Amino acid sequence: MNIRKIYVVLIVLLSMGLFYEWTSENRSAVQLKHMELVDVLARDSLYSSGDEYIFLENDLLEIKIAISTGAIVESRLKKYGVENITGSLGVRVFGSDDRGVFKYYLKTGFTGSSSSKGFSLASYGKDYVELFDAENGFRKRFSFLPASYEVQIEDISERGSGGKAFASMYRTEGMALDLKTNFSDGGMMNSSSYQGVGFNTSSDGYVKSRLSGIDDPVSMSSRSGWISFIQKYFFAALIGSDDYVYNYFAQPASDGVYRMGYTVDKPETQNLVFKHSHRVFIGPKIRKDLVSRAKNLELTIEMGWFWFISQPMVWFLDFLNGFVNSWALSIVLFTLLLKIALFGVTAKGFASMAKMRKVGPKMKEISERHKDDRQRLQKEMADLQKKEGFNPLGGCLPVLVQMPVFIGFFFALREMVELRHAPMGLWISDLSVPDPVFVLPIMFVGIMVLTQRLNPAPPTSDPTQAQVMQYMPVMFGVFFLFFPAGLCLYSVVNSGVSLVQQRYLYRKLGALESGI
């Protein structure tokens, strides 16, 4: 046994153990700090109705309203904790960070209207808040629509306003609030998720732009439609109705603040506006839910170039989960069904590889015999391929077929909020973050090593190429350390089934020696 390899394995295992202990301690420290914040906010007088802010909540959503401006300055999703522990605060969509550098808030009203005194609290109850601006005769009423993640904001002008009704979201550049970016919480996957402005109009199903790409004002008009700021897992969207024409816009940053929203055209027969109701969605990006709220709203689940593969995958995963009620089991079942669907294609590829494996000694002998005569070598190889009936590129077929599926699944699992804090059981409590004890990456490396032993040896003995191939499983294993556990689970099941299928076909075709 090679003592050097034993030392390498021991060093790797020790390093992984130390890294796990370090990440566990960091996670515990972060959770402890968060629960201290929960205690502080519970005692904070501003966390109930007061002179500056008032809160409105239902079972799913809590919004914090600045009384003087009538702006929603914070929102928390009560069913989605910041930390994966009991008693955690809900994640925020609107809000600001501790340093006040990042801000994201919503305002509505009428263009051209201002007040030196601002709003005051007129009345409030369990399911509504009403503000009043006595100086200008403006009223603002907040309530929840039956679809609980939606807030209805009614702007009322008792004297009539000559301006247009508007709704605007204001945001500085930066990551979404409460989005974890450290390694143990899926930092790389969270950091790289798409962020930008998305539009939907009657003529454009879905138009998007990153904030950094908004150099000039963007505008488009439509009945109905929507505008949103796209970010990972949770977002806010202003949703129009069929009754009005909306002028959607996104403006470049002014003093570091981007503005996006709409103004509403007045009817031609109307000079003054007395009332307008705004519909605001603040919630999780669950595909089947977004589909039911507005046309194409599900496209805000940003799945990259392979969205046409990812979207059906999300639908089918959700369908399976409706029966088994386990996202981990749904991923396993999905992978098995996918392997069955692609069985014919992969079988052809493995059959070609089996033939190459059987004639491997002949290929090697030809290569050595004609190593100095490239033209003769190519002719002999072509004759051998014709005689034995194999295609050297046939083994690439399974990889080529599965690569788009893997990429599509990668984006699907990366963006599915349903996997956030979803347990697999055993040692994995969150499928959206890396495997905390690296079991799945190690399993994948092991399966890849066994698969390499089955693959036919190359006809040439290039030492550099051989060394690269030898360390390729380790390279993939390092990548998988950063991948979500849900994606690693898919890869392990997919590779494991492929290994079993390959061994079966090899043995059937007589390409598998005993003991392998």
Image: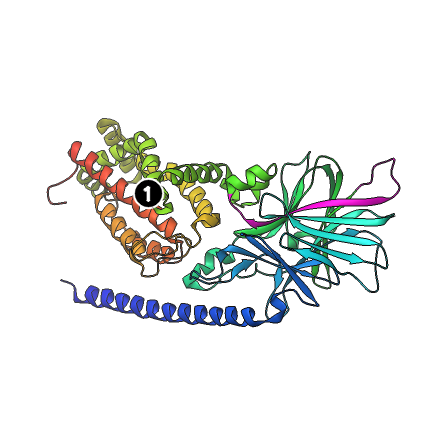
Q: Residue at x 40, y 53 (%)?
A: 484
Q: Nearer the viewer, residue 60 or 114?
A: 60
Q: Position of residue 348 (x, y in %)?
A: 29, 31
Q: How many marks?
A: 1
Residue furthest to the left: 514
Q: Which quarter of the rendered picture does the N terminus lie within?
A: bottom left
Decide if residue 462 is on the left or right side of residue 265. Answer: left
For label 1, the residue is 332
Residue 355: in magenta span: no
Colour scheme of the rendered structure: rainbow
Quarter of the image for residue 370 reads top left
Residue bounds of the magenta highlight = 265-286
182 above or below 248?
below
Decide if residue 169 is on the left or right side of residue 194. Answer: right
Confirm whether residue 99 shows in the render: no
Q: Nearer the viewer, residue 155 or 172?
A: 155
Q: Which quarter of the rendered picture does the C terminus lie within?
A: top left
Decide if residue 223 is on the left or right side of residue 194. Answer: right
